[in-house]
Every structure is written in C-alpha cells, then in structure tokens.
Image (tube, rainbow, N blue to C red):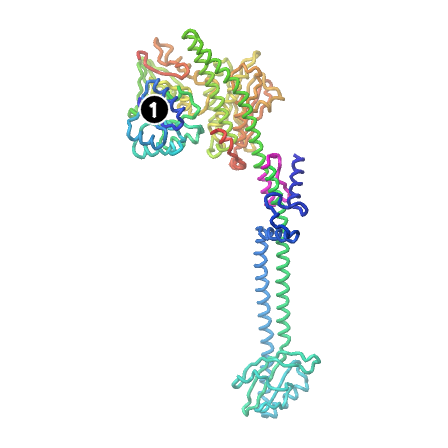
C-alpha cells in the first residue's frame, strides 16, 4: 500500500512538473515543434486559461473591477457635485455683494468693490469688468473669455486661463458668473476651480491603477490557482492511465486538505478499491468454479455412462436417478453462485423494503423446528416482538436458512444431543443481530475467516453433501446490507452472528460504490 | 394440454418441446417475440411458456399485450434473472408464474400442469373435497371419512394447497413459495418433514394413503381410488 502510494505520487509530479515532457501521451506537445520553450510556455498558459478555475477567477475579476469602478465613480460624482456647489455658492454670494454696490453706486461702485477685493486678496478670486467693447476696466483677468459670447444677459460660464503669476504659465480652469450690465459693460466674477480638476485626475488615476492591479492580480491568481488545479488533475489522470495499463493497485493521490478534489480522489479510490476487490473475487470465483465443478461434473458423467452400460432395468433406473440428484446438486451450486454474484453487485439494494427480522426468524424457525426435533435435537427461538430494518426479506431468510443448514449438518457431535438456538436482538447502536448457535465441534479459530470464502469447506474429504458456498452467501448478504457475519466460539459449538444495521441512514450509505460487472458474469 | 413455447434459444427450446411432448402435451414453438404474439393470439393454448429476454420483443411486453387484449391464458416466465424483484415485475405484467434458469424440468412440468388447470378455474370455493377428505375453508375444519382431523395453521395451509392442486405433482419449491412465501433452495429437505407430519395426520389411520411422494419431482395428493 505504501509503495503504491509513493509510486502514484512520483507519477503525479512527473506529469505536473516542469522538466518532464508534461503531457506524456495524452496531450502530445510535439506539434508545437520548433517553437521550443516559448511555444510550450504559450501552450501551457492557454491550457491553464481554459480551466474552470481560471474562468471563475476571470469572471470574479470582471465583477470586482466593475464594482470598484462603480463605487469610485459614485464617490467622485458626489464629491464633485458638493465642491462645485460650494464654489457656485461662493460666487453667488460675491455676485450679490457686487450687485448691491452696482445698484447703489453704479459702475464706480463695482470698480471700487473689485479693487478692494483685489487688494484684500481673495484666494482664487477672479474678476473682470470691461467696457462694452471689451476693454478691461478693473480685475485680474486680461480679457473676456470667448465663451461668454453666447450668453444673453447673465449665466454660468466655464473657461480656461493662463496663469501669468506662476513662472510655468500653467493653464487653469475657472468657473465664473457672467453679467452684462445695463449699459453694455461686461462683468465676470469667478473662482479658480483647478482643484476640482485635480481631484478628478486623482480619482481617475486611482481608478486606473486599481483596475490595472486588480486585473494583474486576478489573472496571476487565476493562473496560479489553475496551475495547482491542473497539477492535481494531471496527478489523477496519470494514475488512471497507469491503472488502465493494468496496475490495479494504484491509487489517486490525496493531499489531505479535504477539499473537493480530495473528495473526488477519495471516491475514485473507493471505487478502485471495490473494482479491485470484485476483480479479485471474479478471478477467485472462476478458478474455484473450474476446480470445484470439475469433480461433480466428472462424477455426473461417470454415472451417466454407468446408466448407459447397466444390464438390467432397475440398475439403469437407479443410476439415472442418482444422475439427476447429482445434477440437482450442481444446479443448487450454480444458483448459490448467482445469488452471491447478485448480492456482491449490490443491485438487490434497489429492492430493499422494511423487513421484520423477528418475524422472518419465527417463520423460518417454524419451518426448521420439526427437522431438528426429528433428529432428536432441541430447537430454541428467542426473538422480540419486532426487529425492523431496511433490507431484502428473501435474502435475509436465505441467510438464516443457510446458517441453520450448516448447524444441522455440522453442529452434531457424538457426545451430546444437538441443540440449535436462533435469537434475534436489537442492539443499542441501531443494529439487529441474528444469531444461530449450535453445540457441535465448532470451527477452529484460525479457520473462522477462511470458511466464509467461496468453496472452502472444513470437511476436506467432502463426504457430506454441500457446495462450500453456504457461509460465503451469508457473508455476501451481510455485506449487501452493510452488515457483518462473525463466527464465534459457543463453548462448545459455533455461534454465527449476522449483524445488520437497522437505521435508515445505514441503508442509504450502502448506495455508495456499486459495480455491476458480476451481473454480466451471470448473463454470460 | 396445448402449450406454446416462446423461446429464442433453439437448443433449449427443442429440449423443452421434447420433454413436454413426452409428458403427453401438445407443444408449439415460436422463436421470436412477434411470432409468439401472433401464435398466442390465433391459437387456442392452455398455457404459454415465455422467455423473459427475447431479442426483438420483451417477454413482458408479449404477456402485457395479451392481457390488455383480454387474453387470460396462463403464462409462465422463464428467465435468467432469478431475482425476487424481477419476479414481481413479471407477475405485475400479467404472468402467472415465474421460473428462473437453470431450472429442473420436473419443476417446470409441475408448474405448468397447475397453471393449465387454473384456466378452467372454479368459482370462489368455501369447501374443498378430494376423495373422502373434505376441507371447510370458513370453519377451518378438515375431515376424512367424516372424522375430524386437527391441524396446525401451517399444516392447514399446506393441505389446502395440495387439495387445490389435487392430482397434480407439486414440487418442494412450489410448496415453499406458496405455503411459506419464501423463494430459496433449502439444502436440507425441510419440506419433507412437514409433509411427513401432515401424512401422519391425514393418512396414518386410514387404509389407503392419499399423499404420495413422486420421486425426483415432489408430492401429489389424490383420491385413493384414482
């Protein structure tokens, strides 16, 4: 087990690693040709970009970028609105002040106010009063901006100026209120709003940088994630390939992080485990069939030949009758084999329904009690009123019958009269235990596991009739119900304990890991 | 009896026909589903033996079609699918009995003879009579030559089944299925013990036995003078 795990790991790194020809077989890179490292790098990148992880990362990235952009834009828009409103209010207040002066003192009043403002040095304040021809009378602007031409009487105007006070002649944005005075004079009261434009630029830069970084991180992260993902998928693929190559012992590497890939790997391993077990079972069965059916078939043939040769009619009749009996035994063996195959394949689970094991025990006990009594033995049944579980009634009955047949056949001893006890018990851990106990010679401890295998019999000489399939069918039926068959010492005798889960949960768990090829064997 | 066998495996079919004819029946063969359906519709058969798995038409379909058309000819399914749920499916489709391959011929013969009698089914009975034995199904009372025989409930059921099929061989498997409702091969002859107990009650005190063992097949209950 350790060895194969190590092998699997080595395979995985070989397939995912950088130095090995990455796509050994399945994804042939040779067509990339002379492109060499660059070509391969590109191919690898494209392969990573095609993974679902990468796509997910990309979608996430777009969504994230869009929401960042939306949030920033909204913030910017709100701030911009607020700032602009502030500027407008300041200008409006200024306009009201100058308008008052104009109303009282006329043009000279306006000029006086402007000059006073200039002297006081209003930060960012821009003023201009010109004659109707555009000749400046007062203020710190050199000329009327062309933008005022379209304005009828008064209104907001936005324009650019060149700042001559700064040595670098920077262009600045201005928001102003333009008024055409009654005698044709032009008045502009404005404020430098360059800081608003700066704010806009900063926000735009933040936006661009954020988007750029997000994209970079997103793509990088996506590639990194998908590389990790691909490496593990490649590990699984590599294992599957070696298994297809005939090495059934291989297992998919599990990293132990318990993530979805680990879960996938684990269920794949479970499946492989079952396939391997079934394959082994098949191999065993076919060799066992070959071996164990040969003897009775040879005997059958000999008896048929005897019948053919027999001189008188009674002899012939007898030989034929025993041929038929022999054939019947063979048929029974086959039926048992088919039943085991069915039980092992797990298909019978589809037909599970509620079964009262206590009732089954009572009915079968009624069927068997007379036989035990006729043999001079004693039969005891100890069952509760009810013991329900999800299962197959016929198969549970079959299991009980096989155990009883065994007790009848092998439970006898010369020292004491035969005593068979059947008991049904509900355990606190939600199981039903069906126990068949006898007081015969029992089964030696080292053979208790062995006798559950197909065709294994304690009676090496095979004098007693039987196929050696009885207990292995019971074990199969136990497995089908997710239960166990345990053989114990009854001091003296054998105590066979069939332990079946009674909870609904247990019955459902049984649905994992089915395989159906023994069924094909059956039809073949 | 007139029997139709619908079976695609020629070798198995020939063997079946030979056996049926030797047992005194008239048997016809259809090797495909549609042919079988046609023959079953046109001919007057007492029993149909239908293979469950036919290449062109499922055995279930044939019987279901016949039942839908009102044809109640008893049908027995033969199948390699010897599982209980397959059996239930077969019976639900309108089959009357189900036998899993590999089967023994005596088992098949016993079953179709019981089926063939069912065609001329008696109305619901409350009384069964075979020779001088009488069973009152309502009072759960059995008498032979006027003398009451006390039976356990299961023995009563066993005798009832034997009486309903009086004159026909019933196999151990048939008894296990119909009296105990279990479908398995008992390795030990559990049925024999129950038969011998029943025999002790119904035959022991009388001159002529009614319950006979048929070697290699099963048992038959018949009136002493038959």
Q: Find residue A39 and report its horizontal and vertical position in percent.
A: 63, 53
Q: Does the magenta segment cover residue A334?
A: no
Q: Find residue A266 and report its horizontal and vertical position in percent.
A: 60, 40
Q: Main secondary structure of the magenta part?
A: loop
Left or right: B15, with A416 as reference point: left
Provide the residue designation for mark 1: B115
Q: Compare residues A214 and B53 and report the one nearer the observer.
A: B53
Q: Find residue A201 and report its horizontal and vertical position in percent.
A: 63, 71
Image quarter of residue B47: top left
* Mark 1, other Cα within 10 Å: few <14 / some 14–19 / many ≥20: many
Asked whether residue A378 appears in the rendered view, the answer is no
Q: Compare residues A291 and A120 and report the one nearer the observer.
A: A291
Asked whether residue A213 appears in the rendered view, the answer is yes
Stretch in magenta: A244-268
Which residue reaches farthest front? Answer: A34
Residue visible at 36% across and 34% down in the picture: B61
């Amino acid at each position: 087990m350790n060895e194969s795990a190590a092998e699997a790991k080595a395979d995985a790194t070989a397939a995912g690693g950088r130095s090995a020809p990455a796509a050994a077989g399945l994804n042939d890179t040779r067509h990339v040709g002379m492109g060499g490292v660059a070509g391969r790098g590109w191919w690898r990148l494209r392969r990573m970009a095609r993974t679902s992880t990468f796509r997910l990362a990309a979608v996430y990235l777009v969504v994230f970028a869009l929401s960042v952009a939306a949030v920033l834009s909204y913030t910017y828009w709100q701030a911009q609105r607020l700032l602009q409103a502030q500027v407008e209010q300041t200008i409006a207040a200024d306009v009201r002040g100058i308008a008052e002066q104009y109303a009282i003192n006329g043009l000279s009043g306006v000029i006086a106010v402007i000059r006073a403002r200039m002297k006081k040095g209003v930060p960012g304040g821009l003023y201009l009063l010109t004659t109707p021809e555009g000749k400046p009378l007062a203020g710190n602007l050199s000329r009327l901006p062309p933008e005022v031409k379209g304005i009828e009487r008064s209104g907001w105007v936005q324009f650019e100026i060149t700042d001559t006070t700064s040595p670098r002649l920077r262009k600045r944005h201005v928001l102003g209120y333009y008024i055409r005075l009654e005698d044709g004079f032009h008045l502009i009261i404005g404020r430098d709003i360059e800081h608003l434009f700066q704010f806009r630029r900063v926000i735009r830069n933040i936006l661009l940088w954020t988007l750029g970084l997000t994209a970079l991180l997103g793509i990088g992260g996506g590639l990194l994630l998908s590389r990790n993902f691909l490496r593990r998928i490649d590990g699984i693929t590599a294992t599957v390939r070696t298994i297809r190559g005939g090495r059934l012992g291989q297992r998919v590497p599990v990293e132990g992080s318990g993530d979805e890939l680990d879960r996938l790997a684990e269920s794949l391993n479970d499946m492989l485990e079952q396939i391997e077990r079934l394959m082994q079972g098949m191999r065993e069965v076919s060799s066992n069939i070959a071996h164990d059916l040969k003897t009775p078939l040879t005997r059958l043939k000999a008896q048929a030949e005897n019948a053919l040769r027999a001189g008188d009619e009674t002899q012939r009749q007898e030989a034929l009758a025993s041929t038929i009996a022999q054939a019947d035994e063979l048929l029974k063996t086959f039926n048992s084999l088919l039943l085991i195959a069915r039980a092992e394949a797990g298909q019978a689970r589809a037909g599970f329904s509620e079964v009262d094991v206590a009732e089954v025990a009572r009915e079968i006990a009624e069927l068997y009690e007379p036989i035990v009594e006729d043999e001079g033995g004693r039969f005891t049944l100890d069952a509760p009123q009810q013991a329900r579980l999800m299962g197959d009634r016929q198969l549970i009955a079959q299991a009980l019958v096989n155990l009883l047949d065994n007790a009848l056949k092998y439970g006898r001893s010369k020292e004491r009269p035969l005593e068979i006890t059947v008991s049904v018990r509900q355990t606190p851990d939600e199981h039903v235990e069906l126990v068949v106990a006898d007081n015969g010679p029992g089964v030696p401890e080292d053979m208790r596991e062995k006798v559950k295998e197909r065709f294994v019999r304690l009676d090496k000489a095979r004098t007693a009739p039987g196929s050696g399939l009885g207990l292995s069918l019971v074990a199969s039926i136990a497995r089908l119900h997710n239960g166990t068959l345990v053989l114990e010492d009854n001091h003296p005798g054998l105590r066979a304990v069939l332990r079946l889960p009674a909870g609904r949960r247990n019955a459902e768990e049984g649905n994992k890991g089915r395989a159906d090829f023994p069924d094909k064997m059956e039809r073949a | 009896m007139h029997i139709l066998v619908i079976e695609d495996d020629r070798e198995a079919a020939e063997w079946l026909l030979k056996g049926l004819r030797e047992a005194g029946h008239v048997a016809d063969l259809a090797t495909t589903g549609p042919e079988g359906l046609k023959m079953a519709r046109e001919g007057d058969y007492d029993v149909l033996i239908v293979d469950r798995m036919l290449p062109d038409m499922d055995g279930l379909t044939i019987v279901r079609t016949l039942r839908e058309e009102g044809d109640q000819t008893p049908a027995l399914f033969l199948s390699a699918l010897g599982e209980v749920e397959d059996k239930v499916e077969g019976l639900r489709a309108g089959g009357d009995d189900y036998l899993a391959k590999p089967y023994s011929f005596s088992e098949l013969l016993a079953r179709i003879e019981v089926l063939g009698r069912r065609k001329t089914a008696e109305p619901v009975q409350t009384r069964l009579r075979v020779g001088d034995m009488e069973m009152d199904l309502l009072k759960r009372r059995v008498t032979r030559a006027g003398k009451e025989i006390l039976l356990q409930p299961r023995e009563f059921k066993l005798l009832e089944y034997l009486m309903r099929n009086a004159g026909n061989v019933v196999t151990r498997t048939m008894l296990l299925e119909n009296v105990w409702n279990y479908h398995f091969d008992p390795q030990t002859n559990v049925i024999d013990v129950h038969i011998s107990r029943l025999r002790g009650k119904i035959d022991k005190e009388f001159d002529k036995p009614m319950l006979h063992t048929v070697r290699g097949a099963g048992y038959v209950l018949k009136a002493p003078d038959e």
